Image: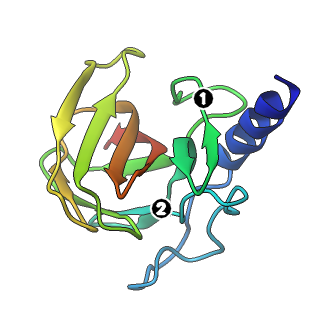
Amino acid sequence: MRAAGAVAGLVLALAACGSGEGSSSPEGPAGAPPERPGEGPPPAWVETEGDSVWLAYSTFCWGGTCADLVAPSCSGEQAAPHVELRRGETVRFHLDFDPNEAVLTFFAEGGEPGQVTLDQSRTPTWQADRAGAFTVFGSGDGRDASYAGCAVLR
């Protein structure tokens, strides 16, 4: 239980590290990615029309390490990285693995809850149609990872 709390604290602390400033490149947003938690999944990021942002680590089972966390939040001390979007723009998520399944989940925090099935791709896309806390989930080869963010419509 103590180890699970330490992992949860580490992962939640990483949520605050996800906002990228400035221009992005094909390798990811400006600035260092969140630190990979042990043998956990590789970092992931989201590309928008205006910027790219590192996503926070969320729940995962990867390389013998599992972490199960609470749903992401757009506010508070450990808020997920904010991703500014224009309604209708195409958003591209960058995963550093080939998922057999990819799902975008929104959490009811003043926004509309729900799930969107994404392309089975390293770079699945989504048409921005709502705001709120979200996770991007990918699974494949006996491992899975979720990454957290907060969509903010401008």
The foreground one among 12 and 128 is: 12
| Residue 147 image position (x, y, % from top left) | 47, 47
Outermost residue, bottom direction? 26
At 30% across and 67% down in the image, what residue appears? 98
The vertical placement of 133 against 103, above or below, is: above
| Residue 83 image position (x, y, % from top left) | 42, 50
At 25% across and 48% down in the image, what residue appears? 102
Circle 2: element type: strand
- Image label count: 2
- The colouring scheme, among rainbow, by chain, secondary structure or one colour, is rainbow
Lower position in the chain sequence, tag 2 or tag 1: 2
Residue 82 disc label: none
At 56% across and 40% down in the image, what residue appears? 80
Which amino acid type corresponds to the residue marked 1 in the rendered image?
Leu
The C terminus appears in which quarter of the rendering?
A: top left
Tell me which corner region of the image, top left, top right, bottom left or bottom right, holds residue 3.
top right
| Residue 53 image position (x, y, % from top left) | 47, 61
Residue 95 is left or right of residue 148, and the answer is: left
The foreground one among 38 and 104 is: 38
Residue 69 disc label: 1
Circle 1: element type: loop
**Within 10 angstroms of label 2, few (less than 14), some, or many (20 or more) residues?**
many
Q: Mark 2 points at which residue?
A: 53
The vertical placement of 57 against 129, above or below, is: below
| Residue 25 image position (x, y, % from top left) | 42, 85
The N terminus appears in which quarter of the rendering?
A: top right
At 45% across and 83% down in the image, what residue appears? 27
Cα–Cα gap, marks 2 and 1 = 21 Å
